Image: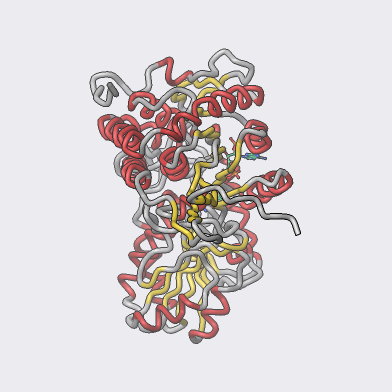
């Protein structure tokens, strides 16, 4: 009987936190809060040898899991959702503390993981094949989707629970086993909480192993002869490396990578609504989201009013320790990332951009003590192609504004990137917005919305430097985590043909 309840005991006790690798060859590490460096908890790390051990257990467990009914798999997924719901405050707190998230960031990830689990429960019962015309008299054929076996999942730190659930849940729902390597910095919220929820929900042992560890552990997972598919979410540089290793092994790699997304404001846009959406698109989790609006392309007649409104709204936000209630902008994941953002801003200003707000790393702020990694909301205008703030994925709370004269120039600017993840177009005319979206080579485009949008049933993913065309979500998960087998059946064996 699954033990969902347990609001009485925490989801993660000391043993669950230390994980199965405690005292092992991978050593251990202390999780710390970004910014303050306050210790959170110690965890055990996996070593590369552990990947093989976990893979063998996964292979052994997967065969019978694949033979369970869809109702049995759905039950486990629904129970895991109930466990997460019963422990939502605790899990949200782990996520916020490891990521430096402010306010509802952690709760939002828990809610997304729960939605993913319910969607996975429904996915398990979706049709899994189609009848095909026979190629001989008395023959019928069908194509059926078969679980691939063991799926390797590698995830980043920025939305650790949501992104792990997005791959782990559909892979399990479709009858696979999963080896999950979360980013070390967010191994609790991005891995251990899921493992604990599934264990309480009654998932058979061996089907989900969490392997917190360094890049070598991730590479071992990609190279293992037992992983059939790799689902990777992270930077373009790492995705390239993983894609090349997987390609050499003729293994499917589902790559969800970085973005440099255009937020376009046409001359007929509702300006206050566009400003609201722009703030959400650029500032959610401090801009550390792959779908964040990285380039704001604004019609020249609106650019000054748009910039002034952004500056006015952002100047009121308080930066500091995310544990302080009034703080809206917490630290970036680490000091290295804050230095990188500062470099992009400084180099863009040196190249001619105008700094309208922010622009300097903060060592301290109200209530901030000695936090590191704080970077204030920053607005740049006069940003053009060739400047780092236009060309690169920033991953920080920076809004680069570029003005344009007409729709043709706006399309050219929006397309002036090798990334192809998301875009948003603001206009009073939805037909004009759709025509604009049709001209963008991006995996996602939203008219009068935000560049950031996602749900378990939609095809999420990008092109170019943003990914290799695979999609997460809904029936697209079936493409990622199953293969197709063609089966034929003759009504009776045929007599062998006579020679001559
Ligand atoms: P990253 O450096 O590529 O790391 C992502 C994961 O890969 C981590 O678990 C990391 O482990 C692991 N890793 C690093 N090198 C590896 C290797 N050689 N082999 C196997 N695994 C390896 O990414 P990040 O900078 O943390 O994450 C931010 C990036 O992710 C941004 O570019 C963002 O746009 C992108 N992202 C994309 C999406 C999407 O859906 N398209 C969603 C979220 C984020 P360790 O760090 O523990 O070593």
User: In which quadrant of the rendered image does the N terminus lie?
Assistant: top left
Q: Evaluate whether residue 100 shows in this view.
A: no
In this view, 474 is above or below 114: below
In this view, 183 is above or below 267: above
Please tell me which residue lies in front, 134 or 460.
134
Q: Give the total of numbered labels.
A: 0
How far across and how far down the image is residue 60, in percent?
Answer: 54, 25
Of the four image quadrants, the one with ligand 1 is top right
> Which color scheme did the rendering employ for the protein?
secondary structure
Considering every residue shown, the one lying at the far right of the view is 500
Q: Evaluate whether residue 355 shows in this view.
A: yes
In this view, 366 is above or below 497: above
Q: Residue at x 40, y 53 (%)?
A: 474
Q: Residue at x 37, y 18 (%)?
A: 13
Considering every residue shown, the one lying at the far top of the view is 23
Quarter occupied by residue 51: top right
How far across and how far down the image is residue 85, in percent?
Answer: 27, 35
Please tell me which residue lies in front, 246 or 94.
246
Q: Residue at x 65, y 35 (%)?
A: 215
Q: Residue at x 44, y 57 (%)?
A: 131
Please tell me which residue lies in front, 141 or 311.
141
User: In which quadrant of the rendered image does the C terminus lie?
Assistant: bottom right
How far across and how far down the image is residue 285, in percent?
Answer: 42, 49
Left or right for 116, reference 46: left
How far across and how far down the image is residue 350, in percent?
Answer: 65, 65
């Amino acid at each position: 009987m699954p033990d969902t309840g347990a609001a009485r005991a925490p989801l993660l006790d000391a043993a669950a936190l230390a994980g199965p690798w405690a005292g092992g060859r991978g050593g251990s590490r202390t999780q710390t809060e970004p910014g303050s460096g306050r210790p959170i908890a110690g965890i055990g790390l996996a070593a590369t040898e552990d990947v093989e051990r976990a893979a063998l257990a996964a292979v052994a467990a997967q065969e019978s899991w694949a033979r369970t009914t869809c109702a049995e798999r759905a039950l486990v997924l629904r129970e895991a959702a109930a466990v997460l719901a019963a422990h939502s405050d605790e899990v949200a707190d782990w996520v916020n503390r490891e990521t430096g998230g402010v306010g509802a960031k952690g709760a939002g990830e828990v809610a997304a993981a729960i939605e993913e689990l319910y969607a996975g429960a429904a996915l398990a019962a979706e049709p899994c094949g189609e009848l095909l015309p026979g190629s001989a008299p008395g023959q019928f054929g069908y194509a059926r989707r078969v679980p691939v076996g063991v799926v390797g999942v590698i995830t980043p730190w920025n939305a650790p629970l949501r992104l792990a659930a997005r791959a782990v849940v559909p892979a399990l729902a479709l009858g696979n086993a999963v080896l999950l390597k979360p980013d070390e910095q967010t191994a609790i919220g991005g891995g251990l909480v899921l493992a604990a929820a599934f264990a309480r929900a009654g998932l058979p042992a061996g089907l989900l192993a969490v392997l917190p560890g360094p890049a070598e552990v991730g590479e071992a997972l990609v190279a293992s002869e037992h992983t059939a598919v790799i689902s990777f979410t992270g930077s373009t540089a790492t995705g390239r490396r993983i894609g090349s290793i997987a390609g050499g092994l003729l293994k499917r790699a589902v790559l969800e990578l970085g973005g440099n997304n255009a937020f376009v404001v046409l001359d007929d846009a509702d300006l206050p609504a566009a400003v609201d959406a722009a703030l959400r698109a650029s500032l959610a989790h401090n801009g550390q989201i792959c779908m964040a609006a990285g380039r704001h392309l604004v019609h020249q007649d609106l650019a000054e009013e748009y910039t002034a409104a952004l500056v006015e709204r952002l100047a009121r936000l308080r930066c500091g320790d995310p544990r302080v209630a009034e703080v809206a902008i917490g630290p970036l994941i680490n000091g290295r990332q804050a230095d990188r953002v500062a470099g992009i801003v400084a180099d863009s200003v040196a190249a001619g951009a105008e700094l309208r707000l922010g622009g300097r790393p903060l060592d301290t702020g109200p209530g901030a003590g000695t936090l590191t990694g704080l970077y204030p909301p920053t607005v740049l205008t006069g940003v053009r192609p060739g400047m780092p703030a236009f060309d690169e994925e920033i991953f920080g709370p920076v809004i680069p504004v570029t003005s344009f004269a007409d729709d043709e120039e706006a399309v050219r600017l929006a397309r002036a990137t090798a990334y192809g993840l998301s875009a948003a177009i603001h206009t009073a005319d939805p037909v004009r917005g759709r025509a604009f979206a049709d001209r963008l080579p991006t995996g996602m485009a939203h008219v009068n919305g935000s560049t950031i949008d996602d749900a378990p049933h939609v095809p999420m993913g990008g092109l170019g430097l943003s990914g290799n065309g695979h999609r997460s979500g809904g029936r697209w998960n079936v493409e990622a985590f199953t293969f197709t087998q063609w089966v034929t059946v003759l009504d009776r064996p045929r007599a062998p043909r006579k020679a001559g």
